[in-house]
Image (cartoon, rainbow, N blue to C red):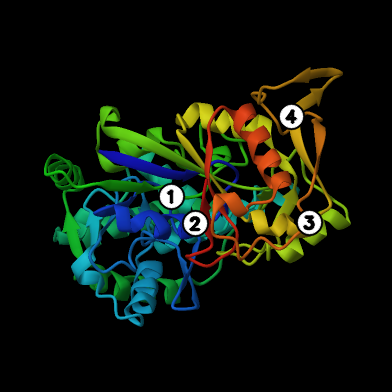
Amino acid sequence: MVDVLLGLQWGDEGKGKIVDYFAPNYDIVARFQGGPNAGHTLYVEGKKMVLHQIPSGIFHQNKVNIIGGGVVLDPVTLKRECDAVAAFGIDVRKNLFISARTNIIVPTHRALDKASELSKGESKIGSTLKGIGPAYMDKTGRNALRVGDLLDKRFTTQYIKLRLKHQKLLDNFHFIEDISAWEEEFFEALEFLKTLNVINCEYYINDQIKAGKKVLAEGAQGSMLDIDFGTFPFVTSSNTISAGVCTGLGVSPKLINEVFGVTKAYCTRVGGGPFPTELHDSVGEEIRKIGSEFGATTGRPRRCGWIDLVALKYACMINGVTQVVMTKADVLDAFEELQVCTAYGIDGATTKEVPFQMSNIQIDPVLQSFKGWNMDTTQLKLASELPATMNTYVDFINNYIGAPVTYVSNGPGREQIVKI
């Protein structure tokens, strides 16, 4: 069977730590979508490690880690990560496998991403400029190069053909930046990529499941950034929800078992786009400061606000969430009063549904206040030790979203998590 772990907000929910925590219970950890715009932060041997492409189970020596066909892969980022992981004594050639169907991000994808974002001016969507959008466009346009193509003697010819196509688009954007250094680094990284394990993921993973192996599918970004069900057009370019597991790894829906959804105890968002509960005051700034809310990939300050239960319930519904993991609860330790959004006010009416289009309307959050626990929770180990006011907060969320919060993370460390 396949269990799924994914984000329920706009990404940055702390999924990396949670995957690392759950990994000992699984034989395989597999990324099913996204690209190097995802930054999963782990603390290994007291050192901070941010993974962008490699699954977060890589630091468990006896686990197989798979990059699935639904991912768009930047060979340069992958090589850098593999080098960083090797410093911890991990041999990626033993426990990292890449689907032959995984699409490759080429240097001109990055150039197109940058040129397109610059052309938008004030309407830019906040792209990380990693080439993800253009890479997925080539995938759906049937122009993409895939990892399996590296073994074909026609690869260079295919690459040149794709590059020429991109150059015409770049000319239309009047993009003149020299990317020759990017290309040199890219081809060096391709030689490294050829030394890794390239597999027919769909056969491999189904064979492993038939043999009784347990798989944890790791999502990138968050549900509200899903290309179809997120806050379009301020979304990513892939299906970040649980349905993406099937297309990203090549497994049947009937094999999906538990769906673990990860949410912060509050909300954050990086880049542009609607954010109904965003705080533009000292409270929002205090959350950002205490929570060190800066993008793992970009370093950009994250926008901060109260937890949005309308969006959270929606995300639980479309994902079929069976258990919720609440992260960064300790960030709220210092607050005497907390608020949660229970409905949206739109054009004088109140709704508990996420509207089709959130970008061009005024959404006023309907907030309900709760007493904060106002104590240090970072050392707590047992559910019985959690303060009553935190239990009240969590219980209200449980009842509203219809999925139980079964874990509360109370710090960045591996051991700082409480099972409820």
| Labels 1 and 2 touching (C-beta < 8 A) | yes
Q: Amino acid at mark 2?
A: Ala
Q: Nearer the viewer, residue 228 or 60?
A: 60
- Sequence-first tag of 2 and 4: 2
Residue 141 visible (yes or no) = no
Estimate the spatial distance between the alpha carbons at disc 3 and disc 1, rounded to whole Å.
37 Å
Amino acid beneath label 4 = Thr
Residue at (31%, 51%) from the top-left corner? 30
Which circle, 3 or 2, is nearer the viewer?
A: 3
Horizontal arrangement in the rendering, residue 72 relative to residue 345 (left or right): left
- The amino acid at mark 1 is Gly
Residue at 25% across, 31% down: 252
Few, some or many residues within 10 Å of mark 4 (<14, 14–19, 20+): some
Amino acid type assigned to the residue bearing label 3 in the image = Asn
Whether pointer 2 and pointer 4 mark residues with C-beta atoms closer than 8 Å, the reply is no
Residue placed under numbered mark 2 in the picture: 38
State the count of labels.
4
Answer yes or no: do the residues labelled 3 and 2 have beta carbons within 8 Å?
Answer: no
The relative height of residue 81 versus residue 374 in the rendered view (above or below) is below
Q: Secondary structure at mark 3?
A: loop
The dot on residue 374 is: 3
Residue 168, position as x, y percentages in the image = 46, 52
Question: Marks 1/4: CA distance?
Answer: 30 Å
Using the rendered view, name the quadrant where residue 45 is placed: bottom left
> Looking at the image, is mark 4 or mark 3 earlier in the sequence?
4
| Residue under numbered circle 4 | 342
Q: Residues within 10 Å of mark 3 (few under 14, many from 20)?
A: some
Q: Please name whichever residue, 240 or 49, is drawn nearer the observer in this view of the structure.
A: 49
**Which is in the foreground here, disc 2 or disc 4?**
4
Can you say whether 174 is above or below 86 in the image? above
